[in-house]
Amino acid sequence: MVIIIIRGMIRNVEKEIAMSKVLIIEDEENLAKFVARELQHEGYEIEVHDNGRVGLNAALESSWDAVLLDLMLPELNGLEVTRRIRQVKNTPIIMMTARDDVMDRVSGLDHGADDYIVKPFAIEELLARLRALLRRIDIEKDKSVAKQTTLEYRDLTIEKENRLVRRKGEVVDLTKREYELLLMLMENINTVLERERLLEKVWNYEDPTETNVVDVYIRYLRNKIDIPGEESYIQTVRGLGYVMRS
Ligand code: CA
């Protein structure tokens, strides 16, 4: 829960890596178990899925420091999983390919994977690549923090350059649309934004009959940013639209 906050403050690389969360999507049971065990032993927090579609959902639903992704998977292959993750997130991905096929590796990287490893691999090599990737990401994060524009609303913040939303310091995972909708609201505090205007700005829709899309996404957004039992940060203005009031 506190991983993200601590990661930003502690400079000791080993400590940071020790708390990283890694998602493993691999359908070869023995390999998945072996990698999972080794990673846990190194102090990583892990979750394993053996199916592309289920793994993709897990990748999108939570915040991960890295994803270890098999290429050939049931339901959704690794390339497709990568492509769909990349539509909304920059989570670092290491592709695990069974064949030492140049085309596989090239298309993996083309689809947005950050690195690849060819099976069978020595676990030390995987661990080294994972550490290198996490370090690289941390350096990039440090650079981007330096020129971060932060919008604040109570305990909710948006870091614009790295498109990161936090509530009470914890990262809230939003899809691209949800993010853009929230950004629009937070850039216009106390201004009622009509559904039509949101539709036009966030979705680029001209057709004002589609406004229920906005309501649906506001609901998704509330589910993610609000705390159950507390008043929503986003207020509905009947017949008009939505507003965040200070
Ligand atoms: Ca496989």
Image (cartoon, rainbow, N blue to C red):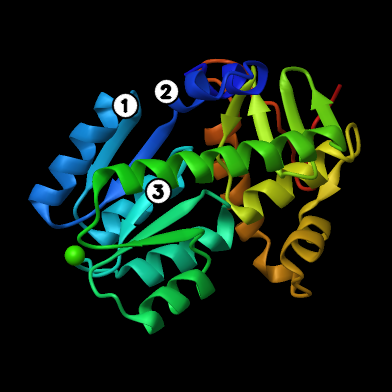
Q: Would you place residue 103 above or below residue 44 in this image?
A: below
Residue, disc 1? 42
Q: Which mark is residue 67?
A: 3
Secondary structure at numbered mark 3 = strand
Answer with the quadrant where ligand 1 appears in the image: bottom left
Label 1 near ligand 1 (CB < 8 Å): no
The answer to whether residue 24 shows anywhere in this view is yes
Which is closer to the viewer, label 2 or label 3? 2
Quadrant housing residue 246: top right
Identity of the residue drawn at 29% across and 75% down:
100
Identity of the residue drawn at 19% across and 53% down:
50
Q: CA distance from mark 2 to mark 3?
A: 16 Å
Secondary structure at numbered mark 2 = helix
Residue, disc 2? 18
Asked if labels 1 and 2 touch by Cβ distance under 8 angstroms, the answer is yes
Comparing 44 with 244, the one in front is 44
Quadrant housing residue 176: bottom right
Which is closer to the viewer, label 1 or label 3? 1
Task: Name the outermost residue toward the left.
Answer: 30
Left or right: residue 230 versus residue 66 is right
Mark 2 or mark 1: name the one nearer the start of the chain: 2
